[in-house]
Amino acid sequence: MQHSPEQFLRKVTGYWISQSIYVAAKLGVADELINGPQTSQELAKKLGCHDGSLYRVLRLLCTEDIFRETEKGFELTALAQHLRSDTQASMRAAVCMYGEEAFQAWGNLFHTVKTGETGFDHHFEKPVFEYYAEHPEASETFNKAMTGLGRTMYPNQTMIDVYDFAKHRVVIDVGGGHGDFLCDILLANPECQGVVYDLAHVIVGAGNTFEERGLTQRARARTCNFLQEVMPGGDAYLLKRIIHDWNDTDAIKILKNCADSLTEEGRVLVVETVIPPGNEPFFGKNLDLHMMMITGGLERTEEEYRTLFSMAGLELVRVIPTICPLSIVEARKSGV
């Protein structure tokens, strides 16, 4: 397959597009267009920005099928629906997350490759989760982004469809944030109870989630540092997109804390992308670099998970693929 110099340059300058999408998300352009087309002048006046600059950003995004320019002004497309803040399919928070601190961290990729130091740590002079603890607005954007991605890129239902959670009496969602995944599991399995364990500044939204979804009798939120504490009482320990945040040393600590609480029939369920062999595109390979730049973690192969589990007193049972990029990597106590 032949590629032109222009196609190559489009790959090189991909951040021109991503940052333009970020600006549209941050401004809330899509929300303003819900009721119909508007000109850039009308949008600029409502959003408090420069008309000519906004027009040029939107004109470029129209070439990517994000917005469409008509005689009446700019209107929403199917892709632009993801930039709305009022829908289940919203990825607005994720776009803002990737366009702000993450974008600044990625500017240090050369430094990371030369030194091995995480780009975020180098740029902000502290690890990302420490940064979030000190910046509540960024932390809230992160949590909303994780919830939004859980509904779009990594729908919770795809995991529920392939795994029988009903066989576990108590499901513990380790690092479960606002509890969105746990709620979906509990609603699909009325006999189950659930607990979200996470840091205090993270779980502030979990209570509201449980109340909104009518689960205050079956779901609880508990403060916990999963790197340091055992989380008792679970039959299944669920870690959705958690282990990839950490290097092997810290990942083993987290998994061991789960293993130490596990019953003989219990399971640890790691929900992550599992890197396949070969040269074919796979989103987990993209995400792997993002982990390298932001948290110092990584996406892993099946064999790497097998080794990780072994070091934590667990053994890999099976890898269960889903229709989204994530798989469920199931583990039990070693020797059971």
Image (cartoon, rainbow, N blue to C red):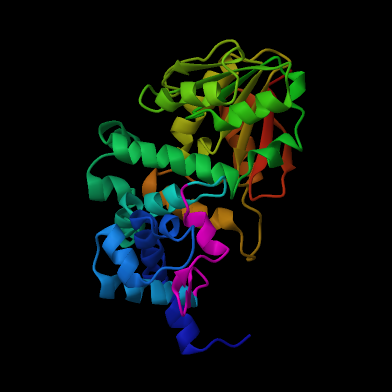
- The residue depicted at 25 percent of the width and 63 percent of the height is 49
Q: What quarter of the picture does the N terminus occupy? A: bottom right
Residue 100 in view of the camera: yes
Q: Percent from the top left, x then y, of residue 285? A: 55, 56
Q: Position of residue 306 (x, y in %)?
A: 64, 36
Task: Please indicate whether residue 100 sits to the left or right of residue 227 in the image.
Answer: left
Name the residue at 52% across, 36% down. 243
> Is residue 128 visible to the viewer in this orientation of the structure?
no
Please tell me which residue is depicted at 51% across the width and 49% down the height of the picture: 90
Return the residue nearer the eye: 196 or 5.
196
Total labels drawn: 0
Query: Which residue is at 59% across, 26% downward?
Result: 213
As for residue 244 lying within the magenta part, the answer is no
**Quadrant holding the C terminus:** top right
Decide if residue 161 is on the left or right side of residue 221. right
Q: Position of residue 4 (x, y in %)?
A: 51, 89
Residue 300 sits above or below residue 250 on the image = below
Residue 138 against residue 250 in the figure, above or below: below
Q: Against 184, is 17 above or below?
A: below
Q: Quadrant of residue 235?
A: top right
Residue 208 location in percent, x, y? 47, 24
Is 154 left or right of 162, judged from the image as shown? left
Which residue is more in the foreground, 173 or 150? Answer: 150
Q: Which residues are magenta?
A: 64-85
Front residue of 38 and 203: 38
The image quarter containing residue 108 is bottom left
